[in-house]
């Protein structure tokens, strides 16, 4: 059983790059984040003023007083050692509190470090203390979703990972990372094999970490590709703990003459596979590196392969960092991190976290003194074209099945990531995409009815 448990943990880490807090396996209450002088403007992109002063007097809900709002941030730092979500949350809270808080209430962060497997324990603490969950995520989030629904706790996650948690009730995704019944990468996959590299359509290869979680994720990709006429000629698995020598995989990929390669696994393993491919002089037309590798670190880790191999990723309609000169919302986030952050590089998941925080704050501010869970939830669902002030393509927050119909592609080069032209006349995204709906059963989202509740119980 210990071996199986470790495999499950590693498989989740292989699927997503998640974050945590500074105290392993515990809840950490940090109190109101310090409010310094407002060095960065309160007006964010086209949202106008998000945070500001007010004079609330009541305590209308759990976690809400006349002075503060207690909000939970789920993370996995105790296992992954990745603090990105907690830093994004601290940056946002510092900026917001410096301007007076959310309609006068200062943000108080409760950090819930699951250490990967302690999701239910942390969720029960969140149920006891928090008004809502905002800006975080955990790789094994399905473990706590029913506890969250039972205590009627709304969630504004940065990203969601597992079947059951994705698009579950009381979850409000500002920038979706996956969909329950549709393939969110349909537009990207279709572009790869019909426009970008049409000769690859008959020779797709897949390398997957060996676990049930990754298998389901990869099965969806295969079904989607085959629905547009692509042929999978090679599919192999590797141990979730990693591979010391990727040469046999490289030779197998070459033998099958793979033209397009999809890698479903830990970001740290892909550069090793690419190095093996480069060593034998084999270059597929494209490699889908996944957007958890959209970071400067990948360019360094890829070494000599960064010029020889062709890595592309789908950002799902989020503005790329290199377009900051054209995207005021990106420049604003850069200024916020420069003022309040600790890291030298902003990560892609942190952009999603900021979108979640902006959606929560904008929705909660509209509730004024009467800040209840029902009010903030209903207010969030009224955003049918949410862009986080111009940070990403429009998202219909009220639509859980197909909230976004846009994609954009980035390619890795030796000098940095670059946007791939999609024939959109200078627009950063291609939109109007009808996502492929899966025909196989991959599970369903958890609902309030699963725990004997309904929306009538939300107050």
Image (cartoon, rainbow, N blue to C red):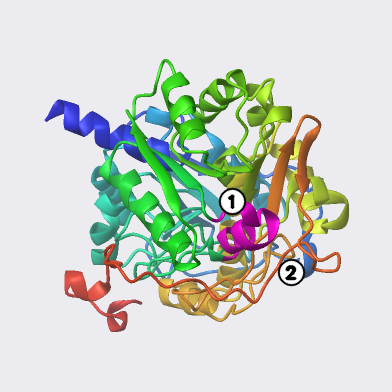
Q: Say above or below: 392 vs 292.
A: below
- Magenta residue span: 187-201
The residue sitting at the top extreme is 244
> Which is more toward the observer, 204 or 142?
204
Would you say the magenta stretch is mainly helix, strand or loop?
A: helix
Which element type, helix, strand or loop, lies under badge 1?
helix
Q: Residues within 10 Å of mark 2 (few under 14, many from 20)?
A: some
**Residue 395 image point, x, y percent:** 60, 71
Instruction: Give the image quarter of residue 75.
Output: top left
- Residue at 28% from the left image edge and 79% from the top image edge: 457
Which element type, helix, strand or loop, lies under badge 2?
helix
- Residue at 26% from the left image edge and 67% from the top image edge: 441
Can residue 5 be seen at all in this image of the molecule? yes
**Residue 347 image point, x, y percent:** 63, 40
Q: Which mark is residue 244?
A: none
Q: Real-space Cα distance between discs 1 and 2?
A: 42 Å
Instruction: Give the image quarter of residue 292.
Output: top right
Instruction: Say if the magenta span includes residue 11.
Output: no
Q: Which mark is residue 200?
A: 1
Instruction: Give the image quarter of residue 434.
Output: bottom right
Say whether disc 1 or disc 2 marks the residue closer to the N-terminus.
2
Instruction: Say if the magenta span includes residue 191.
Output: yes
Q: Residues within 10 Å of mark 1 (few under 14, many from 20)?
A: many
In this rendering, position of residue 64 left or right of residue 430: left
Can residue 28 be seen at all in this image of the molecule? no
In this rendering, position of residue 430 left or right of residue 165: right
> Which is more toward the observer, 25 or 53?
25
> Which is more toward the observer, 47 or 228?
228
Please tell me whether mark 1 or mark 2 is closer to you in this view: 1
- Residue at 79% from the left image edge and 57% from the top image edge: 421
Q: Which mark is residue 47?
A: 2
């Amino acid at each position: 059983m210990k071996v199986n448990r470790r495999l499950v943990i590693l498989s989740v880490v292989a699927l997503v790059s998640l974050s945590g807090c500074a105290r392993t396996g515990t809840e950490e209450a940090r109190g109101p984040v310090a409010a310094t002088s407002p060095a960065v403007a309160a007006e964010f992109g086209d949202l106008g003023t998000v945070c500001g002063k007010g004079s609330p007097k009541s305590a209308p809900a759990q976690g809400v007083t006349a002075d503060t709002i207690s909000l939970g941030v789920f993370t996995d730092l105790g296992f992954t050692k990745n603090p990105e979500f907690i830093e994004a949350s601290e940056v946002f809270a510092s900026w917001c509190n410096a301007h007076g808080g959310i309609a006068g209430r200062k943000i108080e962060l409760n950090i819930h470090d699951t250490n990967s497997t302690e999701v239910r324990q942390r969720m029960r603490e969140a149920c006891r203390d928090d008004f809502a969950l905002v800006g975080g995520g955990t790789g094994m989030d399905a473990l706590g979703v029913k506890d969250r629904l039972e205590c009627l706790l709304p969630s504004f996650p940065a990203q969601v990972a597992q079947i059951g948690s994705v698009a579950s009730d009381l979850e409000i995704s500002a920038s979706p990372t996956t969909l329950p019944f549709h393939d969110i990468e349909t537009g990207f996959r279709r572009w790869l094999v019909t426009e970008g590299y049409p000769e690859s359509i008959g020779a797709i290869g897949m390398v997957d970490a060996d676990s049930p979680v990754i298998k389901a994720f990869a099965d969806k990709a295969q079904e989607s590709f085959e629905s547009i006429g692509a042929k999978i000629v090679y599919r192999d698995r590797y141990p979730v703990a990693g591979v010391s020598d990727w040469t046999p995989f490289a030779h197998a990929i070459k033998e099958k003459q793979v033209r397009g390669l999809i890698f479903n696994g830990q970001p740290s393993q892909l550069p090793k596979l690419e190095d093996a491919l480069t060593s034998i002089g084999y270059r597929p037309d494209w490699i889908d590196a996944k957007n958890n590798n959209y970071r400067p670190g990948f360019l360094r880790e890829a070494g000599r392969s960064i010029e020889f191999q062709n890595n592309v990723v789908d950002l799902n309609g989020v503005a790329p960092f290199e377009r900051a000169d054209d995207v005021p919302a990106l420049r604003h986030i850069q200024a916020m991190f420069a003022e309040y952050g600790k890291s030298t590089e902003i990560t892609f998941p942190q952009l999603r976290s900021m979108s979640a925080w902006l959606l929560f704050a904008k929705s909660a501010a509209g509730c004024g003194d009467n800040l209840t869970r029902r009010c903030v939830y209903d207010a969030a669902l009224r955003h049918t074209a949410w862009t986080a002030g111009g940070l990403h393509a429009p998202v219909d927050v009220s639509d859980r099945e197909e909230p976004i119909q846009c994609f954009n592609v980035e390619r890795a080069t030796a000098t940095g990531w670059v946007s791939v032209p999609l024939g959109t006349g200078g627009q950063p995204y291609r939109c109007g995409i009808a996502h492929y709906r899966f025909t196989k059963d991959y599970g369903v989202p958890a609902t309030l009815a699963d725990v004997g509740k309904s929306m009538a119980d939300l107050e």
